[in-house]
Image (cartoon, rainbow, N blue to C red):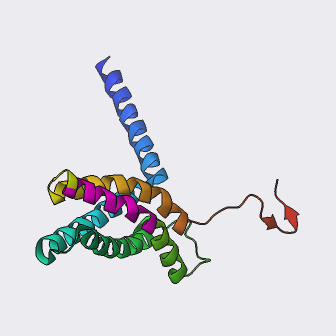
Amino acid sequence: MGKQRRRQQAIDRAQLRSLGKKLVAQHRSFYSYVVGGFLAALVNTAAFVILHDWVHSAIVIDNTVAFIISNIFSFFVNKKFVFKENLDQRHGIVYQLGVFMLYRLLSLIPDNFIMVVGMSWLHWPSVIVKIIDQCLVGIFNHLTTKSVFQKHNHPHRIDSGRRKK
């Protein structure tokens, strides 16, 4: 009985490992995005804290400069490491960077709003506000970033003279 149970446990572990490998392979770009996003958030937070503590300019200026630095970093991380499969080769790097920054500019509005409310109105520490800010803005950024780098399959594209249905 003990031998049969150990054998079944070994089979269960093998099946669990196989399932884990499938999940990792299936969601690799998301996991890579999370790691890249975390690194970009660290760059953003560090740049903001350095600017805010050393330069002492307005919150919105410090946050916008940190935003630019971290998003240029994020663009290259996403292009090189995250969205490697199904990569859009049709558009060049200048186009992709332009679209990427345009989408990210949309997130700068709530980004600056969160920073001003957290620091000026609520008087919370800058690092705490920035961490909360990066978590909230990161969710929005994930949704838009995917559309910049991946090929788009258009169901109405004409292929070989025939319209796909």
Left or right position of 12 against 65: right
Q: Quadrant of residue 112?
A: bottom left
Q: Quadrant of residue 10?
A: top left
Near-viewer residue (31 or 109) = 109
Image position, residue 43 (x, y; %): 25, 69
30 w.r.t. 64: above or below:
above
Image position, residue 68 (x, y; %): 34, 75
- The residue furthest top is 1
Q: Residue at x 62, y 77 (%)?
A: 90
23 w.r.t. 89: above or below:
above
Near-viewer residue (3 or 152) = 152
- The residue furthest right is 161
- The stretch in magenta equals 104-120
What's the magenta bit mostly, secondary-structure-wise? helix
75 w.r.t. 2: above or below:
below
Q: Is residue 108 magenta?
A: yes
Q: Quadrant of residue 116?
A: bottom left
Near-viewer residue (50 or 160) = 50
Image position, residue 144 (x, y; %): 49, 60
